[in-house]
Amino acid sequence: MNGAAVRVVIEVLTGPSRGQRIRLQDGLVVRFGQTEWADFSFPDDPTMAEFHFLLDCRQQACVLHAMESAETQVNAAPVKRHPLVSGDRVLAGETEFLVHIDGVEASVSTEDRNRPRDPVAVAAAGMTVNELCQRLRLKGDAPRLAGACSTPDELVAALIGEKDYFQALRLRGFTLGRRPAVAWGCLLVAETFAQALDAAQSDAVRAAAAWVARPEEPTCRDAEVAANRCDHSGPGGWLALAAFWSGDSIAPADSPQPVPPDDSLSSQAVAAALTLAVLHFPPDDRDSHCQDFVSRADRIESGELVLYEA
């Protein structure tokens, strides 16, 4: 991604260092914590861990990574990894930070700036091809192919050329973002299988689509139930699981402690569903169908193909 440098200012709102303003240089990875060895130290906050969190301000993005066992919250929700935007509030120990970011979307069109973007897609846009490969733990020839690719799209095409449909679709699903990727999967599974799915699989596709239309806790839990009925398998079962893994917690519904899902899980489930769709076609036609699937993702990402109301 080309464009203006990201300008990040972190304002301390509470705690002993209240009023401090920290300006971060684009291209840096910096650590916040109590120890003097942190890049930004807060020794007067006894509840902050020695190294509490880090900010990765590279590739025109600012991504927070929680460190150690201490809890880090963004907008009152515990996180392990979270792409930040202006206005986010980060709580570490007794110290709360307000995030100001300029330049993250400086290179995109006005239409793109006005369209809400999935946080996973935002984070993916800030990663190199090799970083995406490592983040998704792509295997086989993927690491070798990644070294010769300058963009994720090039790696997706190379993986399709190797008939590694699952990893190609998983990478594209991750860069597309969770809600768009589940919508993408629902569209193509419905088109590919038409009336060929049994009742449980069809119900699971509908549950995933219902979450896409209304991404809230009740529809997320309905998708979980539908996935369980399919034994977490089949194109519908995988899509319902992708919707469930896109929610706030994968802990039981009655659990008092949320367990946020890894943000790469949803793309893994969408890719499993779409791989089954690709394999539904004759072998000689699979490359072209997988390429068509990817082109649909491109149209969703650009806003040309609209599958739900933002």
Image (cartoon, rainbow, N blue to C red):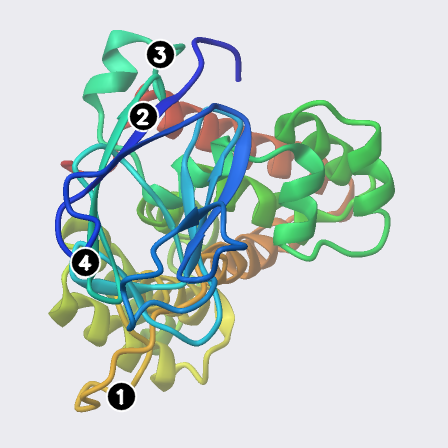
C-alpha span from label 2 to label 4:
18 Å
Q: Secondary structure at mark 2?
A: loop
Q: Amino acid at mark 4?
A: Ala
Q: Which mark is residue 48?
A: none
* Residue that mark 3 sits on: 106
Element type at marker 1? loop
Q: Nearer the viewer, residue 86 or 110?
A: 86
Q: Quadrant of the C terminus?
A: top left
> CB under 8 Å between callouts 2 and 4?
no
Q: Earlier in the sequence, mark 1 or mark 3?
A: 3
In primary-sequence order, the first of circles 2 and 1 is 1
Query: Circles 1 and 4: CB distance less than 8 Å?
Result: no
The disc at residue 210 is 4
Q: Nearer the viewer, residue 63 or 37?
A: 37
Mark number displayed over residue 252: 1
Left or right: 237 with respect to 279?
Answer: left
Q: Nearer the viewer, residue 196 or 305?
A: 305
